[in-house]
Amino acid sequence: MGALRGAGRLMAVIRIAVLARLLAPQQFGLFAIASLAIALLEMLTETGINVFFIQEKDRVKTYLDTAWMISIVRGFVIFLVLLITAPFIAQFFKNQDAVALLRVISIVPLLRGFINPAEIKFQKKLQFSKEFRFRFFIFLFDGIVAIIAALVTRSVYSLVLGLISGVILEIAISFLFIKPVPKLSFESVKIKKIVGRGKWVTLAGIFNYLFHNGDDIVVGRLMDSYYLGVYQLAYKITSLPIYEAGEVFGKVTFPVYAKIAGDKKRLKKAFIKITLAISALVIPFGLILFLFPKQLVLLLLGDKWLDAVPVIRVLSVFGVIRAISGSSSALFLAINKQEYVTALTFVSIIGLALTIVPLVDKYGILGAGYSALIGTFLAIPVIGFYLLCIFKN
C-alpha cells in the first residue's frame, strides 16, 4: 500500500509540476469549483458500500449485484443534479465559466457508478500487491492523458479529460480482470441492509466534506478563482507527503483492525504501534514543508505560485496533526463505531464554521489555513475520550 500511494503521489507531484506551468492559477480554481461540487454530491449520496463489504463477514458476491445497482443509480442522480444545478453553482462562486465545466465533469460520477464493486476484495482480503498494480496503472494513465491534453490545448478541460479517461480504464479493468462480475439485480432487503449500515458513514462523509472543503468553499465565495487555485494547490502540496502517509496506514489497518476487533488487548497494542509509526513518518515531512516552503514552490510550481508559500507553512502543521489524529478513524470503523467518526468530524466542523469567515476576511487564504488548523485541534480531546471508552476495560 505504501508503494501504491507513494508511486501514485509521485505521479501526482509530476502531474502538478507540469500542469502548474501550463495552466494558470485561475484555471486550477475553476477546476476546484467543479471538484467541490462533485465531492459534495458524492458525500450527500454516500452509501458506505466499501465499509459495509469490509465489515461484513459474508462473501463479497452475496451483496455484489445489489451494491452495483445502488452505485449506478447514485451516479445517475449525481449526473442529473450537476446538469441542472450548474448555473446556480457558478452563480454562487461568481464565475460563469464554471457552468460548461460542471456539465462536462458530470460525466465522471455517471461513469464511476458502473465500476465493479468487487474491486474492494483487494482490501478485504489484504491483497495489497494487487491493489498496487490496479491503482497505479490507472494513476499513470490519468496523469499522462491530462498532461498531453494540457500540452496541446492549455485548457482546464485537460484535467477533466484525465479524470474521464481514468474512470473508463478502471471500469474496463474491473470487469475484465476482477471476479465475480456483477449483474443488474434489485433486492430490497439487501438494499435496506447496505443503506442502513451505511447511514453513519454517510453522515460522517458529509461532515468530513464540510470540514475538509469548507475552507475552499469560503475562499471561492469570498475571494476569487485565482486565490482558490492557489489555496488548493498549497493544500495538495502539503497533503501529498503528509496526509497520504496517514491514508496508507488507515487503508491497511482498517481491515486488519476488523479481523482482531474481538481482542481488545491486541487491538490496543496494534493501535499504539500504528500511531507511533505514523508520527515517525509524517513529522519529518512536516518539518521540511514548514522550513522550506518557498524552495519547494519554486522547484515544483514556479514563481507564479509564490502566494502559496505562507499557506503551505500553516497547512504543514495541519497535515501532521490530521494524519496522526486521523489514524483513530480506521479503528472506530473496524469496531462498528461509525458514530464516533461522525461525532469527531462534527466537532472539527464547528471549529471551522466559527472561525473561517472572520479569518478569511482578515488574513485571506492564510486565514483559511488557520481555521482548518483550529478545527483539527478541537477534535483531539474527542478522539481521546472515545479511545478511553474503547480501551478502559
Image (tube, helix red, strand yellow):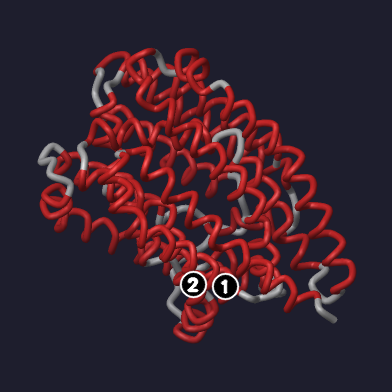
* Residue at (83, 68) in percent of width and height: 260
Asked if the residue under mark 2 is in contact with the one under mark 1, i.e. CB atoms within 8 Å, the reply is yes
Disc number for residue 63: 1
Check disc 2 and give the amino acid type.
Answer: Thr
Q: Secondary structure at mark 1?
A: helix
Residue 134 placement (x, y as % from top left): 61, 39
* Residue at (81, 57) in percent of width and height: 272
Task: Judge left or right: residue 91 versus residue 317.
Answer: left
Nearer the observer, 23 or 145: 23
* Residue at (49, 43) in percent of width and height: 170
Q: Secondary structure at mark 2?
A: helix
Residue 47 placement (x, y as % from top left): 46, 69
Query: Is the residue marked by circle 2 packed among few (<14), some (14-19), or many (20+) residues within 10 Å?
Result: many
Q: Is residue 231 above or below residue 52?
A: above
Report the residue marked by disc 2: 66
The residues bearing labels 1 and 2 have C-alpha atoms spaced at a distance of 6 Å
Residue 76 visible, this orientation: yes
- Residue extending farthest to the front is 362
- Residue extending farthest to the bottom is 189
Disc number for residue 55: none
* Residue at (48, 77) in percent of width and height: 199
Residue 36 visible, this orientation: no
